[in-house]
Image (tube, rainbow, N blue to C red):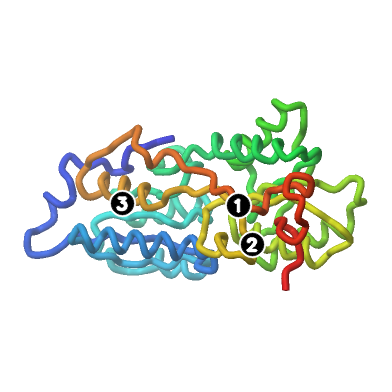
Amino acid sequence: MNTFLSENPTQPLTATTPPDRQPIIGVVAGEFSNPYTLTLLNEVTRQLNLRGAGTLLLNVGDDASCQAVLRTGRPLPVDALLFLAHHLSAEQLAAMTARYPLPAIHVCHSAAREGEAAIGVDDYAAGEQIGHLLLSQGYQRFGFLKGPASPSPLRRMEGYAASLQGAGKTLNSVLVAGQSDREKAYEAMMNYLKTTWASERIDGLFCENDVLAFGAMQAIRDFGEGAHIGVVGFDDVGEARSSMWSLTTWAQRGDLQIAEALNRLLDNRADEQGAWRTGELKIRHSHLSREEHGEMSQCGCASRS
């Protein structure tokens, strides 16, 4: 992972910004239907306010919005860019960094491309732990549900698959929702359940993020027919804690990652081995097997009124 800024300043922005104005950080974000994006936006603006810096939000939620940002005829009134948008293509990112040659860093992003500065948890290790958790429930067939299709596998999926392989199991199915969207996840899971023999279905599922997990769990409940699949998400959004889902998930500690990114952008100060590098499993009910939990009314795929 490249942890150096693409334009590494010799002095912090707080020292080079004129004394009569505050530093302004351009926050590049998209996928606003994902509640984790809103959590990160709230946190980054809160921390920038505390540091006496300003925020300019750049909405690149779709291709048209991204093109509008790139077509802006005048320079952006910002001193650096902080990316919360991980859905941008390599071509879009290259065009943006060429158009705005500013110090830039990606947050909550562990799959940085060559030349990108990024702050993110060890996705591979997180995937490994989630694999071990599902294995501990006695599951025999395993799946992964991802949002957009991508040419290279996600690091968290690679870690997950490696933990399964180490136990003599395999990643049997990779489902693709096409977007990080609850309804698309619902459709992908429902289609899988309807087209796969019960004896061949997965019984343990790791989802790329919590939004996909919610859609998958709802599909399992609506499908019925005694189907039980243990589900684990990623991000620990607020809804994951509700009794509706009781979703076991991985918490990234985005607050610590944002703090580290701002230390680098504003103060030119890095902590390579800080607590921001690790996250933690939030153990709830959704991953539990029937045998482990005993109470079908409380397991992750149970129907709820």
Q: Circle 1 sits on which residue?
A: 284
In the orientation shown, which residue stands out farthest toward the front?
Answer: 294
Which kind of residue does numbered mark 3 sit on?
A: Pro
Q: In the displayed structure, does residue 150 sit left or right of residue 279?
A: right
| Res 214 seen here | yes
**First in sequence: mark 3 vs mark 1:** 3
Residue drawn at 43 percent across, 56 percent down: 84
Quadrant in the rendering for residue 181: bottom right
From the top left corner, tell me how far across and down residue 87 is, in percent. Answer: 53, 56
Q: Secondary structure at mark 3?
A: loop
Q: In the displayed structure, does residue 268 sit left or right of residue 227?
A: left
Which kind of residue does numbered mark 2 sit on?
A: Trp
Whole-angstrom CA distance, mark 3 to mark 2, is 43 Å
**First in sequence: mark 3 vs mark 2:** 3
Residue drawn at 76 percent across, 42 percent down: 142
Q: Residues within 10 Å of mark 2 (few under 14, many from 20)?
A: many
Q: Is residue 142 above or below residue 61?
A: above
Q: Nearer the viewer, residue 51 or 84?
A: 51
Q: Circle 3 sits on which residue?
A: 101
Q: Circle 2 sits on which residue?
A: 245
Whole-angstrom CA distance, mark 3 to mark 1, is 44 Å
